[in-house]
Image: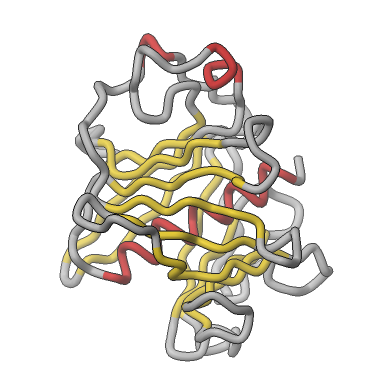
């Protein structure tokens, strides 16, 4: 079976990857360069992203996230602005018969045949780890999204937080450097879904969009499992 881009579906690993414990988490890196709070939109299944930075005092809604479980349709759409009519930046499609996710970007992501696709490859049967190769100009970078009990590496995380199976962290595969985190707030607030923090900001909006869309796709995928 092929992805919308025509690429073959990656072969899944048969050995489950454990959720990382706080004892192996990275040290707390300080303040994130960007922070996106995820809240439910008027259509409860969809989200709004509220961005703040160390120099901004008030979060600003920057993205609208549309989620759909319709067969044959993108599962996640990332749009610019605060409505579902905003400019489409990217989308995610769940690959049938696997936990892999295809991430699409381009001038017209709605046109699946002309969209640039990247494979977010699931590395375990329990969908704890995902691997993505990102092109950065003439070079590339391989990153890993991992489930963790302590996304920011804090040893002072609450007991409730440590018990959650929904936290994520993004690391550089080669160096282990912490790049981004997702902290799940379900159970703490009905309106707030969670928070995505970007610790490594290259200044490239394409990088930011990739971090956001891959995180949101995994969040949606995990919510269906």
- The structure residue drawn at horizontal position 44% and vertical position 58%, both measured from the top left corner, is 212
Q: Is residue 86 above or below residue 155?
A: below
Q: Is 104 drawn above or below residue 37 in the view shown? A: below
Q: Position of residue 109 (x, y in %)?
A: 53, 83
Up/down of 175 relative to 111, above or below: above
From the viewer's perspective, tell me whether residue 199 is left or right of residue 58. Answer: left
Q: According to the image, what is the colour scheme of the structure? A: secondary structure
- Tell me the quarter of the picture where residue 66 sits: bottom right
User: Splitting the image into 4 quarters, where does residue 150 fall?
Assistant: top left
Query: Camera-side residue: 198 or 91?
Result: 198
Q: Position of residue 55 (x, y in %)?
A: 19, 55
Residue in view at x 22 percent, y 31 percent: 29
Please state which of residues 169 and 192 is positioned toward the viewer in this rendering: 192
**Residue in the image at 22% along x and 49% along y:** 200
Along the viewing direction, whichever of 224 and 48 lies nearer the viewer: 48
Q: Is residue 29 left or right of residue 180?
A: left
Of 8 and 196, the residue lying toward us: 196
**Quadrant location of residue 71?**
bottom right
Residue 40, given in percent of the width and then of the height, sits at 65, 56
Residue 9 placement (x, y as % from top left): 61, 58
The vertical placement of 72 against 37, above or below, is below
Q: Quadrant of the C terminus?
A: top right
């Amino acid at each position: 079976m092929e992805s919308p881009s025509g690429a073959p579906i990656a072969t899944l690993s048969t050995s489950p990857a454990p959720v990382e414990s706080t004892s192996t988490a990275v040290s707390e890196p300080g303040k994130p360069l960007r922070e996106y709070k995820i809240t439910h939109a008027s259509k409860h299944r969809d989200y709004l992203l509220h961005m703040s930075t160390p120099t901004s005092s008030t979060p600003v809604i920057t993205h609208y996230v549309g989620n759909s479980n319709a067969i044959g349709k993108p599962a996640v759409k990332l749009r610019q602005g605060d409505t579902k009519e905003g400019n489409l930046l990217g989308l995610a499609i769940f690959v049938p018969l696997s936990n892999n996710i295809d991430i699409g970007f381009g001038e017209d992501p709605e046109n699946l045949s002309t969209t640039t696709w990247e494979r977010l490859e699931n590395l375990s049967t329990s969908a704890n780890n995902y691997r993505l190769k990102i092109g950065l100009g003439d070079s590339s970078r391989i990153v890993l999204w991992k489930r963790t009990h302590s996304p920011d590496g804090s040893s002072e995380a609450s007991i409730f937080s440590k018990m959650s199976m929904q936290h994520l962290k993004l690391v550089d595969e080669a160096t282990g450097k912490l790049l981004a985190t997702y902290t799940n707030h379900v159970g703490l607030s009905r309106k707030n879904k969670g928070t995505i923090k970007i610790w490594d900001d290259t200044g490239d909006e394409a990088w930011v969009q990739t971090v956001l869309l891959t995180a949101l796709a995994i969040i949606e995928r995990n919510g269906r499992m």
